[in-house]
Amino acid sequence: MIKIYFNLLRVPQWIKNFFIFVPLVFSQQMLELNYAKLSLLGFIIFSLISSSIYIINDIIDLEKDRLHPSKKFRPIAASQISKNKALNIAIVLALAAFSLLLFTNIHFSIAVISYFIITILYSTSLKNIVIIDVFIIAAGFILRILGGAFIINVEISSWLMLTTMFISLFLGVMKRRSELKHVINDDSPKTRVVLAQYSNEFIDQMSTVTSAGVIICYALYTVSQRTVSVFGTEHLIYTTPFVVFGIFRYMYTVYIGKKGESTSEILLSDLPMIFNIVLYMITVILIIY
């Protein structure tokens, strides 16, 4: 039962919520206990609310998931847990998350509520609208970043926000690229309607634009006057190769390694990606702190 609930809540997907800690690190407040506690609270709230939404999405997509080669093993689709019980769990998680908002500020609360609303809309309708579906996926990551900044009341660089936007779009495009490549042609309209409106060529062009956007915006962020002034150094530019490698490695896992439907799967299982992320984090912390 523990494994069933673990899969139902999609705990590995919580890795996406680590975006909340980005403002904490780049605001030079990581070593301040009060700021760290607030960011951790934000992570818990987003994790609870995202698990609630995952469950609701699984209930909505129950029949389609049963036709999918891998999603059919999810607890609800596999009849390991009933829809009513799953819905009750989703409600409890959502209520717990919203109750914790009482310990945060209004701006963070707005970010969380906005995340909840747009992801519910995504699950019910927006995921079937071409291009809009990718932007909604990206919006989820952006709201995590904004939430991370709001909860500790710090500003975010415009270049860092643009980098976040492009990396979010990149992850959304890569997800669609993987789904388009792996879902059986006869079943694709049944499992993900919007895939019928995409083509490999179109997705490849989108991936080129978004990946270039990530690299360019991040590189400009590292050398911007505000960044150099705040950190008192130009050395942050030396972290750019890690970002470039990360983008290329992610594309490799999707195009060659046949992964990508799950961001967490790549980030938690691909050793070169894990080493790259760890080295990037160590380098950033050494330079900033």
Image (spheres, rainbow, N blue to C red):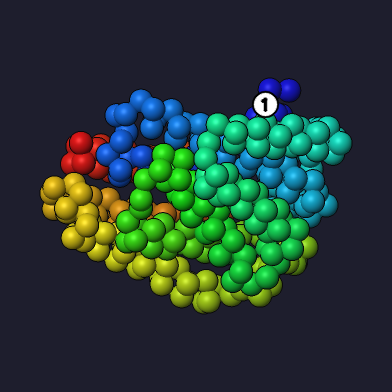
The answer to which quarter of the image holds residue 30 is top left
Q: Is residue 63 left or right of residue 232?
A: right
As drawn, 94 above or below 125: above
Secondary element under disc 1, as helix, strand or loop, is: helix
Considering every residue shown, the one lying at the far top of the view is: 2
Q: Answer with left or right where residue 122 lies relative to residue 220.
A: right
- Tell me, yes or no, if residue 133 can be seen here: yes
Residue 123 position, x and y percent, is 71, 55
Q: Position of residue 154 (x, y in %)?
A: 37, 45
Three-letter residue code for mark 1: Lys
* Residue drawn at x 48%, y 63% as measured from the top left: 169
Residue 271 is left or right of residue 106, and the answer is left
Residue at 75% across, 45% down: 56
Circle 1 crowding by C-alpha within 10 Å: few under 14, some 14–19, many from 20:
few
Quadrant for the N terminus in the image: top right
Placement of 192 over or under 208, stated as above or below: above
How many callouts does the rendering have? 1
Which residue in the protein does label 1 denote? 3
Q: Position of residue 83 (x, y in %)?
A: 84, 39
Q: Quadrant of residue 277?
A: top left
Q: Quadrant of residue 282?
A: top left
Q: Residue at x 35, y 50 (%)?
A: 155
Q: Nearer the viewer, residue 76 or 220?
A: 220
The quarter of the rendered structure image containing the C terminus is top left
Closest to the observer, 8 or 39: 39
Give the residue furthest to the front: 106
Residue 237 is situated, as x and y percent measured from the top left of the image, at: 19, 54
Q: Nearer the viewer, residue 282 or 110?
A: 110
Task: Identify the residue at horizontal 35%, vertical 25% (top origin).
Answer: 33
